[in-house]
Amino acid sequence: MDYAFKWVVQNGGIDTESNYPYTGLNGACNAIKEKIKAVRIDGYQDVTPKEDALLCAVLKQPISVGIVGSSLDFQLYTGGIYDGDCSSDPDDIDHAVLIVGYGSQGDVDYWIVKNSWGMTWGMQGYIYIRMNTGLPYGVCAINAMASYPTKQSTSPSPPPPPPPSPSPVVCGDMSYCSSGETCCCIYEYFGYCLLYGCCSYENAVCCTGTDYCCPQDYPICGILGICLQVSIFLAS
């Protein structure tokens, strides 16, 4: 976990889980989402590898822990308090999870642990791992490698949402042009336009009987699709 926290500090932050979720598939890193800095941290703090120290830390915030997650009964876990066949040797740690709390069932205490394998694993993504077993490093070595992020500075406010897209220009009953364009009638029948075209100029002059238009600063429709500032007939 320490390497992960170091990366977050060096990267200047990290994206949210909801925006960059676990997929369970091999793939490439998303460079765009890597640049999203939804949350930032200043550093991290390691927890003394003892169960009582871990409990004190969990009382204050969720704690990232390394565990041995390669045993088959762990990977196929579906419910109950786990006290399975995983190794308790810290040298065998090969997975990271998040302790989010603790609880008791009868006289058995357990950690409430969030995994990263999606909602279909375990109990909607969670597992109960037994506490107070007498093992030096706990079940699956859960006490051996624990840490949490630290934060002193405030995170910047999120950027404002982008403005809404401009509304299209309504030409007729069923025709539209993009914002900034002008509707020009291409085919008219008894005063009713049957076919519209979109002129790329805003508030343009539509050249009747042609398929082109003219901008406001060259409003005269000339021959061969040429737009003029002044009519050649007036100029002469």
Image (cartoon, rainbow, N blue to C red):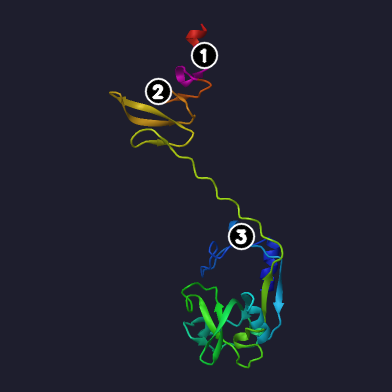
Where is residue 155? Give x, y as percent.
66, 60
The amino acid type of the residue labelled 2 equals Thr
Instruction: Tell me the distance, in whole angstroms, between the alpha carbons under discs 3 and 1.
Output: 57 Å
Q: Nearer the viewer, residue 83 or 226?
A: 83
Q: Is residue 185 above or below residue 127?
A: above
Q: In the image, is 177 to the left or to the right of 149?
A: left
Sequence-wise, the earlier of marks 2 and 3 is 3
User: Is 90 in front, or is 131?
Assistant: 131
Residue found farthest to the left: 190
Disc 2 versus disc 3: nearer the observer: 3
Residue placed under numbered mark 2 in the picture = 210
Q: Secondary structure at mark 2?
A: loop
- Name the residue carrying label 3: 38
Q: Are marks 3 and 1 in contact (CB under 8 Å)?
A: no
| Three-letter amino acid code at the position of disc 3 | Ala
Residue interval drawn in magenta? 219-231
Q: Which residue is the site of mark 1? A: 230
Against 25, is 160 above or below? above
Q: CA distance from mark 1 to mark 2?
A: 19 Å
* Helix, strand or loop under label 3: loop
Q: Quadrant of the N terminus?
A: bottom right
Say what secondary structure mark 1 lies in. loop
Task: Give whichever of 130, 212 is nearer the camera.
Answer: 130
- In the shown orientation, is residue 139 left or right of residue 209? right
